[in-house]
Image (cartoon, coloured by chain):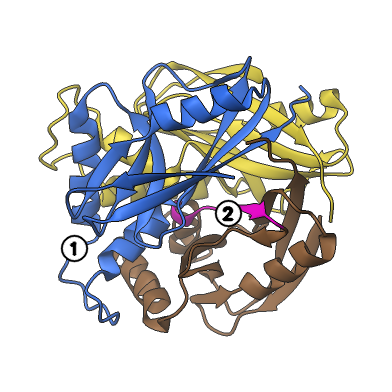
Chain colours: A yellow, B blue, C brown
Amino acid sequence: MEKFRIRTSRRQEMVDITRFVEESVRKAGVKRGLCMVYCPHTTGAVTINEGADPDVASDILMGLGRLVPDGLPFGHREGNADAHLKASLIGPSENLIVCDGRLALGTWQKIFFCEFDGPRERTVCMELIPGGEI
Amino acid sequence: MEKFRIRTSRRQEMVDITRFVEESVRKAGVKRGLCMVYCPHTTGAVTINEGADPDVASDILMGLGRLVPDGLPFGHREGNADAHLKASLIGPSENLIVCDGRLALGTWQKIFFCEFDGPRERTVCMELIPGGEI
Amino acid sequence: MEKFRIRTSRRQEMVDITRFVEESVRKAGVKRGLCMVYCPHTTGAVTINEGADPDVASDILMGLGRLVPDGLPFGHREGNADAHLKASLIGPSENLIVCDGRLALGTWQKIFFCEFDGPRERTVCMELIPGGEI
């Protein structure tokens, strides 16, 4: 398992972490297999989406904010229940295929850490599973 | 593949299954790799979120109920179309990293089976893939 | 990594791809392990849900349309920001357990490619990781 740290700067933010993941895959020298990117926090998540136009990331955060408005009658007293729900909607991890020693990302895909209750210092975990039989 | 059974007691419920998953990892004796927790049902799901305050789980269920209200004009005649949509929003599985023979969960993270159309007897599947090259 | 192509025929559509995935597992001859189904597009996704009643799939698309209405003030100028958000809500991949040489799907489960911005020609990627220690 490898870990890397991120410092987020707003309450909600999508941080492109593709280059960290790509670097780890390159260093590990694994040619084929699965790469797992895992968020150990309960108010953050990992997603894959378009990275070329930064509006896509901000639209996702805006849209999630409409889905999960602040005014819901949440019981959790820390004031961040919206962030917990968003974390479960997006999910704590993404898996990627490693092929020819590289992440098999689509043309427009980037990997994002989603901050839903920042700003904070966050950790993202990674694991590579060698394999690939097809 | 290992399976374990859960009996849910309400229509919607989040059941902490962390100890079942941890026990399986311990018994298997795998030191590094990936642990997959999989729900074979189409009106249930698996998520990872905060387990310390039970309000977080009930807030997630309440919030999902606001997102997917009963009154939508669903075509599916079994009356549980909301549960199918929630299942796809949360997703049927979660993957965890196994490190030093243990699940690499964050401090506040617990693994939950999400019941969206109970009460029922449910099965959760698990598989461990050894590996880890980083 | 294996790839297969799909041609979608509507803007939003859920395409049952179970038989493609099953065939790849059979051909690969892997007895135990993990099968990853991955969508390399940012306006598509992969989910698992009921395949017996086609109304379930159309209810999921209808429900997602209510969650993410067209009228939101999106910044992304291509007019498909709703599709990007839906892609992150459903997620780009699903993992399945392979057991006794077959996908360990539940009785009612089918694997779907979710088109959110079609019609288009799409690619779905697959990778099999042998293993299984429990």
Q: Quadrant of residue B43?
A: bottom left
Chain assignment, label 1: B
**Quadrant in the picture for residue B34:** top right
Say which element carries label 1.
loop
Crowdedness near tag 2: few (<14), some (14–19) or many (≥20) residues, C-alpha within 10 Å: many
Q: Residues within 10 Å of mark 1 (few under 14, many from 20)?
A: few
Amino acid marked by disc 2: Pro
Foreground pick, A22 / C75: A22
Residue occupying the point 68% across, 61% down = C102
Residue C70 in view (yes/no):
no
Q: Is residue C121 left or right of residue A88?
A: right
Quarter the N terminus of chain A occupies: top right
> In this rendering, would A123 be left or right of A128?
left
- Element at label 2: loop
Look at label 1 and name its amino acid.
Pro
Q: Which residue is mark 2?
A: C92
Measured from the top left, where is residue B106 in percent x and y? 45, 20
Identified at 26% across, 65% down, the residue is B82
| Figure check: B81 above or below A87 | below
Q: Would residue B75 be seen by someone viewing this image from the given angle?
A: yes
Any mark on residue A20, and which?
Answer: none
Q: Gap in Å between the C-alphas at discs 1 and 2?
A: 25 Å
Residues at marks 1 and 2, common chain? no
At 22% from the left and 24% from the top, the residue drawn is B53
Asked whether residue A92 is drawn in magenta, I would say no
In the image, residue C104 sits, relative to residue A91, either above or below, namely below
- Between B105 and B3, the one nearer to me in the picture: B3
Q: Which residue is mark 1?
A: B69
Chain of the residue under the numbered disc 2 shown in the image = C
On whether residue C99 falls in the magenta region, the answer is yes
| Magenta residues (range) | C89-100
